[in-house]
Image: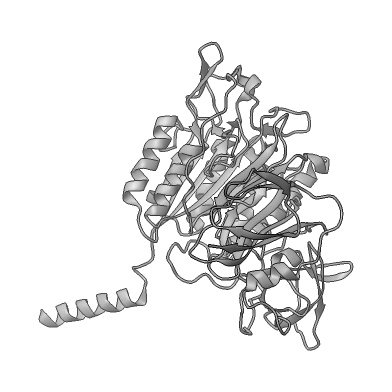
Amino acid sequence: MKNKRRWGRALLLSYLLSGAVLAGERHALLIGVGALPAMPRGSWLAGPTADVNAMRAALRQQGFADEHIYRLADDAGASQAPTRQAILARLAQLEKTLGKDDVLLLYWSGHSVLLPVYPGQAAAPQGRRTRLLTRDSQVSHQGRQLDGGVGSSELGRAIDAFAARQTQVVAIFDTCHAAAGTRSGDGLAWRGLAASDIGWRPPPGKGTPPDEPRARPRYVAFFAAEAQQRTPEAAAAATPGQAAGLFTQAVIAALQRQPQTYAMWAGAATQQYRSALQAYQLPRSAWPSPVYAGALDAPLWQGDDAAIPAPLWPVRRDAQGWLVPFGLLDGMREGDLFRQAGARWRASKTGWGETRLTLLPGSAGAAAGWASRTPAPLPAGSIRQGRLAALLALPATPGPPLLDARIELTLPGKAPRQQAFADGDLGVLPAGTRIRLSVENRSAASVDLGLAHLPLDGPATRIYPALDGDSNRMPPAIGAGISRFERSFVVSGPHYGVEWLALVAAPAANGTLPRRFAILEALPALPATRGAANVAVPVAEAGNPDQAQVARLSWRSVQ
Protein backbone atom coordinates (compact mmCIF):
# COMPACT_ATOMS: atom_id res chain seq x y z
CA MET A 1 0.00 0.00 0.00
CA LYS A 2 2.81 2.38 0.93
CA ASN A 3 4.53 1.67 -2.38
CA LYS A 4 1.31 2.43 -4.24
CA ARG A 5 0.95 5.73 -2.37
CA ARG A 6 4.54 6.66 -3.13
CA TRP A 7 4.02 5.73 -6.77
CA GLY A 8 0.83 7.81 -6.86
CA ARG A 9 2.56 10.85 -5.32
CA ALA A 10 5.46 10.50 -7.75
CA LEU A 11 3.08 10.26 -10.68
CA LEU A 12 1.17 13.33 -9.49
CA LEU A 13 4.40 15.28 -9.02
CA SER A 14 5.59 14.29 -12.48
CA TYR A 15 2.26 15.33 -13.94
CA LEU A 16 2.43 18.69 -12.20
CA LEU A 17 5.99 19.32 -13.32
CA SER A 18 5.07 18.46 -16.88
CA GLY A 19 2.61 21.36 -16.86
CA ALA A 20 -0.24 19.21 -18.12
CA VAL A 21 -2.63 19.95 -15.27
CA LEU A 22 -1.54 23.54 -15.05
CA ALA A 23 -3.24 24.38 -18.32
CA GLY A 24 -6.41 26.38 -17.84
CA GLU A 25 -9.86 25.25 -18.89
CA ARG A 26 -11.58 26.44 -22.06
CA HIS A 27 -15.07 27.89 -21.71
CA ALA A 28 -17.40 29.54 -24.20
CA LEU A 29 -20.42 31.82 -23.88
CA LEU A 30 -22.24 31.90 -27.21
CA ILE A 31 -25.02 34.48 -27.68
CA GLY A 32 -27.32 34.66 -30.69
CA VAL A 33 -30.18 37.16 -30.79
CA GLY A 34 -32.40 36.91 -33.87
CA ALA A 35 -35.97 37.26 -32.59
CA LEU A 36 -37.00 40.61 -31.10
CA PRO A 37 -40.65 40.09 -30.06
CA ALA A 38 -41.18 43.73 -29.02
CA MET A 39 -39.64 45.10 -32.22
CA PRO A 40 -40.98 45.30 -35.79
CA ARG A 41 -40.80 41.89 -37.45
CA GLY A 42 -38.75 43.35 -40.27
CA SER A 43 -35.90 43.99 -37.83
CA TRP A 44 -35.55 40.31 -36.86
CA LEU A 45 -32.56 38.30 -38.04
CA ALA A 46 -32.60 34.71 -39.30
CA GLY A 47 -28.96 33.76 -38.80
CA PRO A 48 -27.89 34.12 -35.14
CA THR A 49 -29.20 30.72 -33.98
CA ALA A 50 -27.38 28.95 -36.82
CA ASP A 51 -24.29 31.04 -36.05
CA VAL A 52 -24.28 29.90 -32.43
CA ASN A 53 -24.71 26.24 -33.37
CA ALA A 54 -21.96 26.45 -36.00
CA MET A 55 -19.59 28.12 -33.53
CA ARG A 56 -20.35 25.43 -30.96
CA ALA A 57 -19.45 22.68 -33.43
CA ALA A 58 -16.22 24.47 -34.38
CA LEU A 59 -15.19 24.90 -30.75
CA ARG A 60 -15.81 21.24 -29.99
CA GLN A 61 -13.27 20.44 -32.72
CA GLN A 62 -10.86 22.76 -30.88
CA GLY A 63 -11.14 20.76 -27.65
CA PHE A 64 -13.86 22.74 -25.87
CA ALA A 65 -15.91 20.36 -23.72
CA ASP A 66 -19.69 20.32 -24.22
CA GLU A 67 -20.30 21.12 -20.56
CA HIS A 68 -18.16 24.25 -20.90
CA ILE A 69 -20.07 25.65 -23.90
CA TYR A 70 -23.08 27.72 -22.79
CA ARG A 71 -25.54 28.80 -25.49
CA LEU A 72 -28.01 31.66 -25.21
CA ALA A 73 -30.11 31.57 -28.36
CA ASP A 74 -33.67 31.44 -29.69
CA ASP A 75 -33.88 27.68 -30.36
CA ALA A 76 -35.25 25.13 -27.93
CA GLY A 77 -31.89 23.40 -27.54
CA ALA A 78 -30.15 26.46 -26.12
CA SER A 79 -29.20 26.69 -22.46
CA GLN A 80 -31.40 29.78 -22.04
CA ALA A 81 -33.12 32.48 -24.08
CA PRO A 82 -30.82 35.44 -24.86
CA THR A 83 -32.36 37.99 -22.50
CA ARG A 84 -30.49 40.77 -20.77
CA GLN A 85 -30.86 39.14 -17.36
CA ALA A 86 -29.72 35.71 -18.56
CA ILE A 87 -26.63 37.13 -20.30
CA LEU A 88 -25.51 39.28 -17.36
CA ALA A 89 -26.22 36.47 -14.89
CA ARG A 90 -24.09 34.03 -16.86
CA LEU A 91 -21.24 36.53 -17.12
CA ALA A 92 -21.42 37.11 -13.36
CA GLN A 93 -21.32 33.37 -12.70
CA LEU A 94 -18.31 32.90 -14.97
CA GLU A 95 -16.54 35.78 -13.23
CA LYS A 96 -16.78 33.79 -9.99
CA THR A 97 -15.74 30.42 -11.38
CA LEU A 98 -13.06 31.17 -13.97
CA GLY A 99 -9.57 31.96 -12.81
CA LYS A 100 -5.93 32.17 -13.73
CA ASP A 101 -4.98 30.66 -17.10
CA ASP A 102 -8.58 29.84 -18.04
CA VAL A 103 -9.84 30.92 -21.48
CA LEU A 104 -13.30 32.32 -22.19
CA LEU A 105 -14.53 32.70 -25.76
CA LEU A 106 -17.31 35.30 -25.77
CA TYR A 107 -19.30 35.26 -29.01
CA TRP A 108 -22.24 37.49 -29.98
CA SER A 109 -24.36 37.39 -33.14
CA GLY A 110 -27.16 39.90 -33.60
CA HIS A 111 -28.15 43.57 -33.85
CA SER A 112 -26.65 46.66 -32.26
CA VAL A 113 -27.54 50.35 -32.15
CA LEU A 114 -25.94 53.62 -31.09
CA LEU A 115 -22.20 53.76 -31.64
CA PRO A 116 -19.32 54.64 -32.23
CA VAL A 117 -17.17 52.42 -30.02
CA TYR A 118 -16.52 48.72 -30.32
CA PRO A 119 -18.24 46.43 -27.80
CA GLY A 120 -16.14 45.75 -24.73
CA GLN A 121 -13.93 48.81 -25.14
CA ALA A 122 -13.92 52.11 -23.32
CA ALA A 123 -16.35 54.76 -24.51
CA ALA A 124 -15.33 57.39 -27.02
CA PRO A 125 -14.61 60.87 -25.67
CA GLN A 126 -18.07 61.92 -26.86
CA GLY A 127 -19.54 59.32 -24.46
CA ARG A 128 -21.54 57.46 -27.11
CA ARG A 129 -21.70 53.70 -26.77
CA THR A 130 -22.89 50.60 -28.57
CA ARG A 131 -25.94 48.76 -27.30
CA LEU A 132 -26.34 45.13 -28.28
CA LEU A 133 -29.99 44.12 -28.48
CA THR A 134 -31.32 41.15 -26.49
CA ARG A 135 -34.51 39.17 -26.92
CA ASP A 136 -36.34 41.36 -24.38
CA SER A 137 -35.25 44.71 -25.87
CA GLN A 138 -38.12 47.15 -26.30
CA VAL A 139 -38.77 50.85 -26.73
CA SER A 140 -40.92 52.54 -24.09
CA HIS A 141 -41.94 55.99 -22.79
CA GLN A 142 -43.15 57.22 -26.19
CA GLY A 143 -39.95 56.16 -27.87
CA ARG A 144 -37.58 57.88 -25.45
CA GLN A 145 -36.23 54.84 -23.61
CA LEU A 146 -34.64 51.63 -24.88
CA ASP A 147 -35.08 48.84 -22.34
CA GLY A 148 -33.21 45.57 -22.45
CA GLY A 149 -30.02 45.03 -24.35
CA VAL A 150 -26.46 45.04 -23.04
CA GLY A 151 -24.28 48.13 -23.31
CA SER A 152 -20.68 48.08 -24.47
CA SER A 153 -19.65 49.52 -21.11
CA GLU A 154 -21.28 46.57 -19.31
CA LEU A 155 -19.37 44.12 -21.48
CA GLY A 156 -16.24 46.16 -20.89
CA ARG A 157 -16.62 45.91 -17.12
CA ALA A 158 -17.11 42.14 -17.39
CA ILE A 159 -13.98 41.77 -19.53
CA ASP A 160 -12.05 43.90 -17.01
CA ALA A 161 -13.25 41.60 -14.23
CA PHE A 162 -11.97 38.55 -16.11
CA ALA A 163 -8.66 40.31 -16.77
CA ALA A 164 -8.30 40.98 -13.04
CA ARG A 165 -8.65 37.23 -12.45
CA GLN A 166 -6.00 36.56 -15.14
CA THR A 167 -8.52 34.89 -17.41
CA GLN A 168 -8.00 35.31 -21.13
CA VAL A 169 -11.05 36.59 -23.02
CA VAL A 170 -11.34 35.97 -26.76
CA ALA A 171 -14.30 38.09 -27.92
CA ILE A 172 -15.91 37.72 -31.35
CA PHE A 173 -18.71 40.11 -32.37
CA ASP A 174 -20.64 39.40 -35.56
CA THR A 175 -22.75 42.53 -35.12
CA CYS A 176 -23.05 45.85 -36.82
CA HIS A 177 -21.53 48.92 -35.17
CA ALA A 178 -23.37 51.57 -37.18
CA ALA A 179 -26.91 52.94 -37.28
CA ALA A 180 -27.97 51.70 -40.72
CA GLY A 181 -30.77 49.96 -42.59
CA THR A 182 -31.40 46.25 -42.22
CA ARG A 183 -32.62 45.04 -45.59
CA SER A 184 -31.55 45.27 -49.21
CA GLY A 185 -32.35 43.57 -52.47
CA ASP A 186 -29.05 41.77 -53.01
CA GLY A 187 -29.79 38.61 -51.05
CA LEU A 188 -28.17 39.99 -47.90
CA ALA A 189 -29.74 41.05 -44.63
CA TRP A 190 -27.74 43.73 -42.87
CA ARG A 191 -27.16 43.56 -39.14
CA GLY A 192 -27.49 46.80 -37.24
CA LEU A 193 -30.42 49.11 -36.66
CA ALA A 194 -30.98 52.84 -36.79
CA ALA A 195 -32.85 54.23 -33.82
CA SER A 196 -35.70 55.14 -36.18
CA ASP A 197 -36.02 51.49 -37.30
CA ILE A 198 -37.32 50.52 -33.87
CA GLY A 199 -39.15 53.75 -33.05
CA TRP A 200 -36.50 54.97 -30.61
CA ARG A 201 -36.08 58.73 -30.25
CA PRO A 202 -33.32 59.13 -27.70
CA PRO A 203 -33.25 62.58 -26.10
CA PRO A 204 -30.23 64.75 -26.89
CA GLY A 205 -27.49 64.78 -24.31
CA LYS A 206 -23.79 64.46 -23.71
CA GLY A 207 -23.95 60.77 -22.96
CA THR A 208 -22.31 58.84 -20.17
CA PRO A 209 -18.73 59.64 -19.16
CA PRO A 210 -16.32 56.91 -20.20
CA ASP A 211 -15.17 54.25 -17.75
CA GLU A 212 -11.64 54.36 -16.45
CA PRO A 213 -9.72 52.08 -18.83
CA ARG A 214 -7.96 49.04 -17.42
CA ALA A 215 -5.18 46.90 -18.83
CA ARG A 216 -6.22 43.69 -20.59
CA PRO A 217 -2.93 41.95 -21.36
CA ARG A 218 -4.60 38.68 -22.45
CA TYR A 219 -7.56 40.13 -24.34
CA VAL A 220 -8.18 39.28 -28.01
CA ALA A 221 -11.08 40.68 -30.03
CA PHE A 222 -12.48 40.11 -33.52
CA PHE A 223 -15.05 42.68 -34.73
CA ALA A 224 -16.98 42.11 -37.95
CA ALA A 225 -17.06 45.79 -38.95
CA GLU A 226 -15.82 49.25 -38.14
CA ALA A 227 -17.90 51.71 -36.14
CA GLN A 228 -19.65 53.21 -39.16
CA GLN A 229 -20.25 49.98 -41.07
CA ARG A 230 -22.80 47.19 -41.35
CA THR A 231 -22.17 43.45 -41.47
CA PRO A 232 -24.37 41.03 -43.44
CA GLU A 233 -25.97 37.64 -43.11
CA ALA A 234 -27.07 35.48 -46.05
CA ALA A 235 -28.33 32.02 -46.93
CA ALA A 236 -25.71 29.44 -46.05
CA ALA A 237 -24.50 27.26 -48.90
CA ALA A 238 -24.15 24.21 -46.64
CA THR A 239 -27.72 24.48 -45.32
CA PRO A 240 -30.15 25.76 -48.00
CA GLY A 241 -32.85 28.00 -46.60
CA GLN A 242 -30.87 28.78 -43.46
CA ALA A 243 -29.20 32.18 -43.04
CA ALA A 244 -25.84 32.69 -41.37
CA GLY A 245 -23.50 35.59 -40.63
CA LEU A 246 -20.83 35.97 -43.30
CA PHE A 247 -18.23 36.99 -40.74
CA THR A 248 -19.03 34.02 -38.51
CA GLN A 249 -18.68 31.67 -41.47
CA ALA A 250 -15.32 33.24 -42.31
CA VAL A 251 -14.06 32.98 -38.72
CA ILE A 252 -15.05 29.31 -38.50
CA ALA A 253 -13.54 28.43 -41.88
CA ALA A 254 -10.28 30.11 -40.84
CA LEU A 255 -10.26 28.29 -37.49
CA GLN A 256 -10.56 24.95 -39.26
CA ARG A 257 -7.18 25.64 -40.89
CA GLN A 258 -5.62 25.20 -37.43
CA PRO A 259 -3.86 28.60 -37.18
CA GLN A 260 -1.05 28.80 -34.64
CA THR A 261 -1.72 32.36 -33.48
CA TYR A 262 -4.65 34.77 -33.32
CA ALA A 263 -2.97 36.91 -35.99
CA MET A 264 -2.94 33.92 -38.34
CA TRP A 265 -6.58 33.26 -37.51
CA ALA A 266 -7.47 36.90 -38.18
CA GLY A 267 -5.58 36.98 -41.48
CA ALA A 268 -7.28 33.84 -42.75
CA ALA A 269 -10.70 35.03 -41.56
CA THR A 270 -10.26 38.31 -43.42
CA GLN A 271 -9.42 36.52 -46.64
CA GLN A 272 -12.47 34.26 -46.28
CA TYR A 273 -14.67 37.28 -45.50
CA ARG A 274 -13.50 39.22 -48.56
CA SER A 275 -14.12 36.20 -50.80
CA ALA A 276 -17.68 35.88 -49.48
CA LEU A 277 -18.40 39.59 -49.97
CA GLN A 278 -16.95 39.50 -53.47
CA ALA A 279 -19.32 36.68 -54.40
CA TYR A 280 -22.27 39.05 -53.87
CA GLN A 281 -20.75 41.61 -56.27
CA LEU A 282 -21.08 44.44 -53.78
CA PRO A 283 -19.24 47.70 -54.45
CA ARG A 284 -16.03 47.90 -52.44
CA SER A 285 -17.39 50.94 -50.61
CA ALA A 286 -20.07 48.71 -49.06
CA TRP A 287 -17.64 46.07 -47.80
CA PRO A 288 -17.31 45.97 -44.01
CA SER A 289 -13.74 46.00 -42.75
CA PRO A 290 -13.12 43.68 -39.79
CA VAL A 291 -11.18 45.06 -36.84
CA TYR A 292 -8.83 42.99 -34.68
CA ALA A 293 -7.34 43.97 -31.35
CA GLY A 294 -5.39 42.59 -28.42
CA ALA A 295 -2.65 39.99 -28.03
CA LEU A 296 -2.87 38.74 -31.61
CA ASP A 297 0.62 37.25 -31.62
CA ALA A 298 -0.26 34.89 -28.77
CA PRO A 299 -0.79 31.17 -29.49
CA LEU A 300 -4.41 30.03 -29.59
CA TRP A 301 -6.11 29.07 -26.33
CA GLN A 302 -3.03 29.56 -24.15
CA GLY A 303 -4.16 31.81 -21.32
CA ASP A 304 -1.05 31.43 -19.17
CA ASP A 305 1.87 33.81 -18.79
CA ALA A 306 4.14 31.83 -21.07
CA ALA A 307 6.28 34.16 -23.12
CA ILE A 308 4.58 35.19 -26.34
CA PRO A 309 6.87 34.19 -29.19
CA ALA A 310 8.39 36.80 -31.45
CA PRO A 311 5.70 38.01 -33.88
CA LEU A 312 5.47 36.39 -37.26
CA TRP A 313 5.00 38.49 -40.39
CA PRO A 314 2.79 37.71 -43.39
CA VAL A 315 4.82 37.24 -46.57
CA ARG A 316 2.87 37.62 -49.82
CA ARG A 317 3.56 37.43 -53.51
CA ASP A 318 2.03 39.60 -56.22
CA ALA A 319 2.81 40.42 -59.85
CA GLN A 320 5.82 42.52 -58.79
CA GLY A 321 7.35 39.91 -56.46
CA TRP A 322 7.50 39.24 -52.72
CA LEU A 323 6.35 41.65 -50.02
CA VAL A 324 5.29 42.14 -46.41
CA PRO A 325 2.22 44.42 -45.98
CA PHE A 326 3.93 46.47 -43.24
CA GLY A 327 6.31 49.37 -43.64
CA LEU A 328 8.30 52.16 -42.04
CA LEU A 329 5.72 52.95 -39.37
CA ASP A 330 5.88 49.32 -38.24
CA GLY A 331 9.65 49.35 -37.76
CA MET A 332 10.57 47.74 -41.10
CA ARG A 333 14.01 48.60 -42.44
CA GLU A 334 15.91 47.74 -45.56
CA GLY A 335 18.13 44.78 -44.80
CA ASP A 336 15.68 43.02 -42.46
CA LEU A 337 15.84 39.24 -42.85
CA PHE A 338 12.72 37.07 -43.04
CA ARG A 339 12.77 33.28 -42.66
CA GLN A 340 10.16 30.65 -43.34
CA ALA A 341 11.32 27.04 -43.11
CA GLY A 342 13.95 26.76 -45.88
CA ALA A 343 13.19 30.11 -47.50
CA ARG A 344 14.86 33.45 -46.75
CA TRP A 345 14.07 36.96 -47.93
CA ARG A 346 15.88 40.29 -47.50
CA ALA A 347 13.96 43.59 -47.29
CA SER A 348 15.05 45.57 -50.34
CA LYS A 349 12.67 48.55 -50.40
CA THR A 350 10.55 49.90 -47.56
CA GLY A 351 7.62 52.26 -47.97
CA TRP A 352 5.00 53.57 -45.56
CA GLY A 353 2.61 50.69 -46.06
CA GLU A 354 4.62 47.76 -47.39
CA THR A 355 8.12 46.31 -47.65
CA ARG A 356 9.38 44.69 -50.83
CA LEU A 357 11.46 41.52 -50.40
CA THR A 358 14.18 39.81 -52.42
CA LEU A 359 14.27 36.01 -52.27
CA LEU A 360 17.80 34.96 -51.34
CA PRO A 361 19.75 32.30 -53.26
CA GLY A 362 19.45 28.79 -51.94
CA SER A 363 15.95 29.29 -50.60
CA ALA A 364 13.77 26.21 -50.87
CA GLY A 365 10.02 25.88 -50.78
CA ALA A 366 9.30 29.62 -50.79
CA ALA A 367 5.57 30.23 -50.48
CA ALA A 368 3.19 32.86 -49.20
CA GLY A 369 2.75 32.39 -45.46
CA TRP A 370 4.12 33.54 -42.13
CA ALA A 371 7.81 34.23 -41.46
CA SER A 372 10.03 35.29 -38.59
CA ARG A 373 11.97 38.54 -38.82
CA THR A 374 15.50 39.49 -37.80
CA PRO A 375 15.89 43.31 -37.90
CA ALA A 376 18.86 44.76 -39.71
CA PRO A 377 21.50 46.33 -37.42
CA LEU A 378 20.95 50.01 -36.65
CA PRO A 379 23.39 52.45 -38.26
CA ALA A 380 26.42 53.42 -36.22
CA GLY A 381 25.70 56.28 -33.83
CA SER A 382 21.99 55.59 -33.55
CA ILE A 383 20.20 56.42 -30.32
CA ARG A 384 20.16 53.26 -28.24
CA GLN A 385 16.40 53.19 -27.60
CA GLY A 386 14.63 51.17 -30.27
CA ARG A 387 11.47 53.29 -30.33
CA LEU A 388 13.38 56.56 -30.60
CA ALA A 389 15.71 55.19 -33.24
CA ALA A 390 12.75 54.10 -35.35
CA LEU A 391 10.87 57.35 -34.78
CA LEU A 392 13.69 59.77 -35.56
CA ALA A 393 14.73 57.79 -38.64
CA LEU A 394 11.35 58.26 -40.30
CA PRO A 395 11.28 60.79 -43.13
CA ALA A 396 8.86 63.70 -43.15
CA THR A 397 5.43 62.95 -44.60
CA PRO A 398 4.40 65.08 -47.58
CA GLY A 399 0.88 66.10 -48.50
CA PRO A 400 -2.12 67.07 -46.37
CA PRO A 401 -2.36 65.38 -42.94
CA LEU A 402 -4.78 62.52 -42.37
CA LEU A 403 -5.82 63.92 -38.99
CA ASP A 404 -6.21 67.40 -37.54
CA ALA A 405 -3.78 67.31 -34.60
CA ARG A 406 -3.13 70.29 -32.32
CA ILE A 407 -1.63 71.01 -28.93
CA GLU A 408 -2.40 73.70 -26.37
CA LEU A 409 0.62 74.72 -24.30
CA THR A 410 0.26 76.47 -20.93
CA LEU A 411 3.46 77.42 -19.13
CA PRO A 412 3.24 78.37 -15.43
CA GLY A 413 1.94 81.93 -15.15
CA LYS A 414 1.45 82.24 -18.92
CA ALA A 415 -1.63 82.35 -21.13
CA PRO A 416 -2.39 79.20 -23.19
CA ARG A 417 -1.21 79.12 -26.78
CA GLN A 418 -2.15 76.70 -29.52
CA GLN A 419 -0.23 75.29 -32.43
CA ALA A 420 -0.39 72.45 -34.91
CA PHE A 421 1.05 69.16 -33.75
CA ALA A 422 3.82 68.72 -36.31
CA ASP A 423 7.58 68.16 -36.44
CA GLY A 424 9.22 70.80 -34.28
CA ASP A 425 10.79 71.73 -30.96
CA LEU A 426 9.12 73.56 -28.06
CA GLY A 427 12.38 74.56 -26.39
CA VAL A 428 12.68 74.53 -22.61
CA LEU A 429 9.53 73.65 -20.63
CA PRO A 430 9.61 74.11 -16.85
CA ALA A 431 7.91 71.68 -14.48
CA GLY A 432 4.21 72.43 -14.21
CA THR A 433 3.75 73.15 -17.92
CA ARG A 434 0.42 71.74 -19.12
CA ILE A 435 0.14 70.17 -22.58
CA ARG A 436 -3.32 69.42 -23.98
CA LEU A 437 -3.36 67.20 -27.04
CA SER A 438 -6.31 67.09 -29.44
CA VAL A 439 -6.62 64.80 -32.49
CA GLU A 440 -9.68 64.90 -34.75
CA ASN A 441 -10.70 62.70 -37.66
CA ARG A 442 -12.96 64.84 -39.84
CA SER A 443 -12.87 62.53 -42.83
CA ALA A 444 -15.28 59.79 -43.88
CA ALA A 445 -12.64 57.07 -43.49
CA SER A 446 -11.08 55.42 -40.46
CA VAL A 447 -7.44 56.04 -39.62
CA ASP A 448 -5.01 53.84 -37.67
CA LEU A 449 -3.40 56.03 -35.02
CA GLY A 450 -0.56 55.73 -32.54
CA LEU A 451 0.43 58.35 -29.94
CA ALA A 452 3.27 58.03 -27.46
CA HIS A 453 5.40 60.04 -25.04
CA LEU A 454 9.05 59.07 -25.50
CA PRO A 455 11.61 60.55 -23.08
CA LEU A 456 15.29 60.07 -23.75
CA ASP A 457 15.61 58.86 -20.14
CA GLY A 458 12.77 57.11 -18.40
CA PRO A 459 9.94 54.83 -19.50
CA ALA A 460 7.90 55.46 -22.63
CA THR A 461 4.15 56.00 -22.25
CA ARG A 462 1.40 54.82 -24.56
CA ILE A 463 -1.21 57.54 -25.17
CA TYR A 464 -3.39 56.13 -27.97
CA PRO A 465 -4.56 53.47 -27.75
CA ALA A 466 -4.32 53.95 -24.02
CA LEU A 467 -3.85 50.28 -23.15
CA ASP A 468 -2.84 46.97 -24.66
CA GLY A 469 -5.92 45.24 -25.94
CA ASP A 470 -7.58 48.32 -27.43
CA SER A 471 -7.78 48.86 -31.17
CA ASN A 472 -5.63 51.62 -32.66
CA ARG A 473 -8.35 52.38 -35.23
CA MET A 474 -9.83 55.88 -34.96
CA PRO A 475 -13.37 55.96 -36.36
CA PRO A 476 -14.37 58.53 -38.96
CA ALA A 477 -16.77 61.41 -38.56
CA ILE A 478 -20.22 59.82 -38.29
CA GLY A 479 -23.11 62.02 -39.37
CA ALA A 480 -22.61 65.50 -38.00
CA GLY A 481 -20.24 64.28 -35.28
CA ILE A 482 -16.45 64.53 -35.35
CA SER A 483 -14.29 61.70 -34.08
CA ARG A 484 -12.07 63.31 -31.46
CA PHE A 485 -9.42 62.18 -28.98
CA GLU A 486 -8.13 64.50 -26.24
CA ARG A 487 -5.58 64.04 -23.49
CA SER A 488 -3.87 66.47 -21.10
CA PHE A 489 -0.74 65.97 -19.05
CA VAL A 490 1.69 68.06 -17.01
CA VAL A 491 5.47 68.20 -17.35
CA SER A 492 6.87 66.75 -14.12
CA GLY A 493 9.63 64.55 -12.68
CA PRO A 494 11.28 62.46 -11.59
CA HIS A 495 13.00 62.32 -14.99
CA TYR A 496 13.86 65.55 -16.76
CA GLY A 497 15.64 66.17 -20.02
CA VAL A 498 14.85 65.72 -23.69
CA GLU A 499 11.39 64.32 -24.42
CA TRP A 500 9.28 63.68 -27.50
CA LEU A 501 5.58 63.54 -28.19
CA ALA A 502 5.04 61.35 -31.25
CA LEU A 503 2.13 60.76 -33.63
CA VAL A 504 2.02 58.18 -36.40
CA ALA A 505 -1.08 57.57 -38.52
CA ALA A 506 -1.99 55.65 -41.65
CA PRO A 507 -5.18 55.06 -43.64
CA ALA A 508 -7.13 52.07 -42.31
CA ALA A 509 -7.14 49.78 -45.33
CA ASN A 510 -10.02 47.35 -45.69
CA GLY A 511 -9.01 43.74 -45.23
CA THR A 512 -5.64 44.29 -43.56
CA LEU A 513 -4.30 43.28 -40.17
CA PRO A 514 -3.75 45.95 -37.48
CA ARG A 515 -0.65 48.07 -37.93
CA ARG A 516 2.26 47.22 -35.63
CA PHE A 517 3.38 50.77 -34.97
CA ALA A 518 6.99 50.72 -33.79
CA ILE A 519 6.50 53.61 -31.34
CA LEU A 520 4.02 51.45 -29.42
CA GLU A 521 6.11 48.29 -29.44
CA ALA A 522 9.77 47.94 -28.53
CA LEU A 523 11.68 46.97 -31.63
CA PRO A 524 12.79 43.37 -31.00
CA ALA A 525 16.48 42.64 -31.20
CA LEU A 526 15.93 39.09 -32.34
CA PRO A 527 18.74 36.61 -32.85
CA ALA A 528 18.73 34.59 -36.02
CA THR A 529 16.16 31.80 -35.81
CA ARG A 530 15.30 28.74 -37.81
CA GLY A 531 12.20 30.53 -39.06
CA ALA A 532 8.53 29.77 -38.96
CA ALA A 533 6.99 26.59 -40.20
CA ASN A 534 5.28 26.85 -43.57
CA VAL A 535 1.77 26.36 -42.17
CA ALA A 536 -1.24 26.22 -44.48
CA VAL A 537 -2.84 29.41 -43.19
CA PRO A 538 -3.55 31.99 -45.92
CA VAL A 539 -2.41 35.59 -45.80
CA ALA A 540 -4.91 38.38 -46.45
CA GLU A 541 -4.55 39.80 -49.95
CA ALA A 542 -5.27 43.45 -49.17
CA GLY A 543 -2.39 45.89 -48.76
CA ASN A 544 -1.72 49.14 -46.95
CA PRO A 545 -1.61 52.43 -48.91
CA ASP A 546 1.74 54.19 -49.23
CA GLN A 547 0.52 57.13 -47.15
CA ALA A 548 1.19 58.26 -43.59
CA GLN A 549 1.27 61.14 -41.13
CA VAL A 550 4.19 61.52 -38.75
CA ALA A 551 4.69 64.25 -36.15
CA ARG A 552 7.59 64.49 -33.68
CA LEU A 553 7.46 67.30 -31.16
CA SER A 554 10.37 67.61 -28.74
CA TRP A 555 11.23 69.74 -25.71
CA ARG A 556 13.67 69.83 -22.82
CA SER A 557 12.01 69.65 -19.43
CA VAL A 558 13.65 71.29 -16.41
CA GLN A 559 12.76 71.26 -12.73
User: What residue is shown at x 36% (from left), y 47% (from top)?
Assistant: 95
* Residue 537 placement: quadrant: bottom right
**Horizontal and vertical percent position of residue 301:** 48, 61
Q: For this rendering, which residue is in front, 204 or 261?
A: 204
Q: Is residue 376 left or right of residue 114?
A: right
Q: For this rendering, which residue is in front, 60 or 342?
A: 342
Colour mapping used in the image: one colour
Does residue 312 show up? no
Q: Residue reaching furthest bottom?
A: 362
Q: Residue reaching furthest left?
A: 1
**Horizontal and vertical percent position of residue 310:** 58, 73
Q: Residue reaching furthest front?
A: 413
The quadrant in which the N terminus is found is bottom left
* Residue 348 placement: quadrant: bottom right
Numbered disc total: 0
User: What residue is shown at x 55% (from left), y 29% (from top)?
Assistant: 207
Q: Is residue 550 left or right of residue 495?
A: right
**Horizontal and vertical percent position of residue 460:** 56, 64
User: What residue is shown at x 81% (from left), y 80% (from top)?
Assistant: 359
Q: Residue reaching furthest top?
A: 142
Q: Is residue 334 left or right of residue 213?
A: right
Q: For this rendering, which residue is in front, 449 or 319?
A: 449
Q: Is residue 499 above or below residue 122?
A: below
User: What residue is shown at x 64% (from left), y 43% (from top)?
Assistant: 415
Does residue 278 show up? yes
**Horizontal and vertical percent position of residue 320:** 89, 69
Q: Is residue 173 above or below residue 527?
A: above
Q: Is residue 297 above or below residue 64?
A: below
